[in-house]
Amino acid sequence: MDSIEIEIKEMDALYFDKEYASYHPSNNEILQKDIHEYQHFKNVIACFYNYTNDMKVEIQRIKTHFESLKPEQRNNLIMNYQERIKKLDYCVKKNAHFCFLIVAAYVDMFPEMDLSQVTYVSDLPYFHHVQHGDIAKLRITLKQFYRDWSIQGQAERDQSYKLIIDQLQSYYPDARTKDVKYQVLLPGAGLGRLVFELASRGFAAQGNEFSYFMLLSSHFIINLTQKKEQYQLYPFANNFCNRLRYENDQFELVKVPDVAPAEVLTENDEMSFVAGEFITVYHQAKYFNFWDSVITCFFIDTANNVLDYIDTIYEILKPKGCWINFGPLEYHFANQFSETSIELSFEDLKHYIKQKGFEIQFEQVQESTYNHSKLDQKYLKYNCIFFMAVKK
Ligand SMILES: C[S@@+](CC[C@H](N)C(=O)[O-])C[C@H]1O[C@@H](n2cnc3c(N)ncnc32)[C@H](O)[C@@H]1O
């Protein structure tokens, strides 16, 4: 990181490049129809623009605490805190630029902010639309780029995506050569890497997502990125804890994408994304008995009622269609008192799946991390359930 100053200048010079704004048409008109949805969308966009300002608060906190050290304590550290904060500042600028590019097309959504005088990403005004919970979601989204679209994420992808791909290919071995492609649905597709992997192997793969953080980010990396390793980010820069060292751990550089879909997919490949809540979008007669496969990866425990997900998966699969699942049962709503949360063990789920009319063809437990950098001292592993169930 010797060339910090120069790199920052080069990066800032990219700001407000109107070319980015012309990449994709604004969906404003569609969203205006639903004011609540529009406001939510606007909040998410604002969160991307506000990355630097949110991080400034964080950096100030760290600075203040370091300044409280006694001089002899401060002077006996390998990296003095100003240097550490300077590095963090650099990483934040890089991340802010990346965040800006993802939502660059939406600057017109904020006429009240008068952005016409802004020259640098770091000078963006404070966006008051940002909600506290969204800041955390954006930081998770940056880590999700590591999982799905970096070379370092390959090891983690091999723990889950590879097993799923192998299983689907062995169930449908003629996928590459078949005239009419197998239709595969991936609810909760995140940043879409698995959707891309299946599309590039001859499946007609459709991802489904309801998070704007994921939808905007996957659109950016899949549709608007031209080449491998086009962008650089530092997804772990704000994590000061559990560090063996700084240079390559906290300040681990991630280049994305490790593979550019634009360079790999051909006209024959079929890949799509549908925005919306899984059950609302797919529990409709037109999708009943439609899909050859449904793939759920780290998804089924996102439900208020996991049995509703299973019912929908059963309805929409064709007879003999397969459901492949990989993931834990963390039940995302378990600690939210205002939300319904049905928390069942796998034993119970298995019983329900069989009663429903599936045949479980295999099941096994596989260890997997999630959004984890190997350089982090903290290591959380899930004993994931990996199974394939076929609709009778
Ligand atoms: C834990 S992440 C898994 C993402 C991806 N499958 C992976 O393995 O990296 C769960 C994803 O499901 C999405 N999600 C949660 N509930 C959903 C629902 N009801 N409909 C559509 N997407 C949903 C979330 O936005 C999130 O991106």
Image: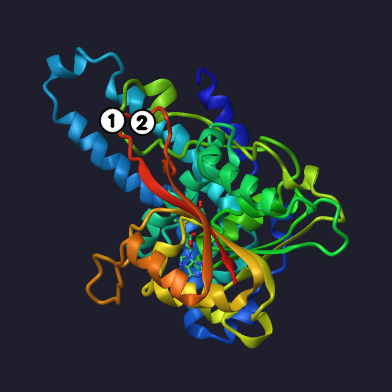
Look at 56% across and 52% down and name the residue there: 100
Q: Which residue is mark 1?
A: 242
Q: Position of residue 114 (x, y in %)?
A: 54, 65
| Amino acid type, callout 2 | Asp
Q: Return the x and y of residue 246 as percentages of the image width and height.
A: 37, 23
The residue shown at (36%, 45%) is 382
As drawn, 364 above or below 310: above
Report whether 185 appears left or right of 158: right
The spot of residue 138 in percent (x, y) is: 44, 54
CA distance for labels 2 and 1: 6 Å
**Quadrant location of the C terminus?**
bottom right
Instruction: Pick the residue in front: 245 or 31.
Output: 245
Residue 16 makes an appearance in the image: no
Instruction: Give, as a three-letter code, the residue at label 1.
Output: Asn
Q: Residue 1 at what x, y percent from top left?
A: 50, 21
Residue 135: name its quadrant. bottom left
Crowd rating for badge 2 (residues with CA inside 10 Å; few <14, some 14–19, many 20+): some
Helix, strand, or loop for circle 1? loop
Taking the spot 61% from the left edge, 68% from the top edge, the residue there is: 108
Say which of 380 and 159 sits in front.
159
